[in-house]
Image (spheres, coloured by chain):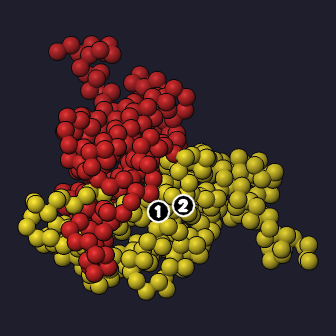
Chain colours: A red, B yellow
Amino acid sequence: MARTPDTGSDVHRERHRAVLETAARLICEQGYEAASVQDIADACGLTKAGLYYYIRSKEDLLLEIMTYGMDIFEERVLLPVLAIADPVERLKACMEKNVHLVTEGWSKEVTIILHEHETLTGAARQQINARKKRYVRFLEASFDEAMREGRIRRVEPRVAAFSFLGMVLWIYKWFRPDGKIPADRLAAEMQDLFFGGLEIAPAPARRGAGGRRARSAKPAKHAGKGVAA
Amino acid sequence: MARTPDTGSDVHRERHRAVLETAARLICEQGYEAASVQDIADACGLTKAGLYYYIRSKEDLLLEIMTYGMDIFEERVLLPVLAIADPVERLKACMEKNVHLVTEGWSKEVTIILHEHETLTGAARQQINARKKRYVRFLEASFDEAMREGRIRRVEPRVAAFSFLGMVLWIYKWFRPDGKIPADRLAAEMQDLFFGGLEIAPAPARRGAGGRRARSAKPAKHAGKGVAA
């Protein structure tokens, strides 16, 4: 193994990774503005000058953490479900994987992506936003496909996509790993809530027709396609 | 009208209100840490010393803004629905009113409550958290009541409450007032999604029984009562 201090070496990569981990923990706990470069250097056991050997700037550090978080997200949530043919099964699997991502150890990078969504500026911000938007478009397209195939009722794909995201991503604000609801039960409950709905269909007496629940027979309120806020 | 500078006067109250408004706008735009007391003073057209005539400290200012936001929330969302007897109608009305609160002009105080949820410390934090928890408990109790009355399927009240909140509160991150989805359509879509569910019931052929959709006939997975993470 090369142990020279050039930036391509394994040692440099490992230390760089450790700096990102420590910085992510600090920024996650204190917020980006409150965590100073000095704080981050102290937590890494480096001088400020030493820290700048690994990072170009504080904003660049934030971009690196968010990029790492988006890599993890795409690897664990998006890529494994892309090939699922049925759009409803694809969305359900996606929800399950996203719940696990938010509730598990990767949550500090994910929390930073969610919480510091307006902190980056310029090209760095565009870069992260483009990756977030790709996820929103994937969800919208899956809801649209599920509608076209008659698998779900008519909805605004954009509202469905952001409702899905809201349910799943809000978890970072309230979930406690030592709480009474384990992550897999949480994922199953949310799938059930979102796709199955809550209300029990009114008794057939209210409407003559038996069979399907009243709701799915209701005429669609809006054309579901191509709508975007 | 008294125009003396004592803190009980109308003029003082008006100026104090204006300081809170300006500070809320700045903190909402820049974040609490990034917006300095000097920035807030400048935006108010006051010196720093002048600003401290209206506020005790920066953290106290944040508490005041959040308290104002919670007052507005309780006045516009919680109080009007408390008296609705049917728990499902109560929850639906609550969702509609909360969507409107987040999409309308009050959103800067609401955004600060949501975004700076870990910024306050000590007694100030407890004070705001107690009011937030009251809302969560109200939602949980309403879901629990709806289950007991056979109005909704069995769910974990805590997961249902935070899913409801996630859908509705996430709106502050993506909704644009000039977008294609007006607030009232958004509220109606979300009510429909959350309470009605998405999936179209499978054709009766899959299960012998007609009538209700298969889902509501499924045995409950968990006891719904008293569960909390």
Q: Residue at x 40, y 83 (%)?
A: B86
Apparent side of residue A61 relative to residue A10 in the rendered image (left or right): right
Residue for badge 1: B188
Amino acid carrying mark 1 in the image: Ala
Q: Residue at x 56, y 70 (%)?
A: B73
**Label 2 near label 1: C-beta < 8 Å?**
yes
Question: Mark number for residue B48?
Answer: none
Q: Residue at x 29, y 21 (%)?
A: A12
Residue for badge 2: B184
Structural distance between the alpha carbons of marks 1 and 2: 6 Å
**Which residue is outermost to the left?**
B208
**Could you say which is closer to the camera, residue B182 or residue B23?**
B182
Residue A189 location, quadrant: bottom left
Q: Chain of mark 2?
A: B
Q: Quadrant of the N terminus of chain B?
A: bottom right
Amino acid carrying mark 2 in the image: Asp
Does any portion of residue A109 appear in the rendered image?
no
Q: Are marks 1 and 2 on the same chain?
A: yes
Residue A104 in percent (x, y) is at: 25, 49
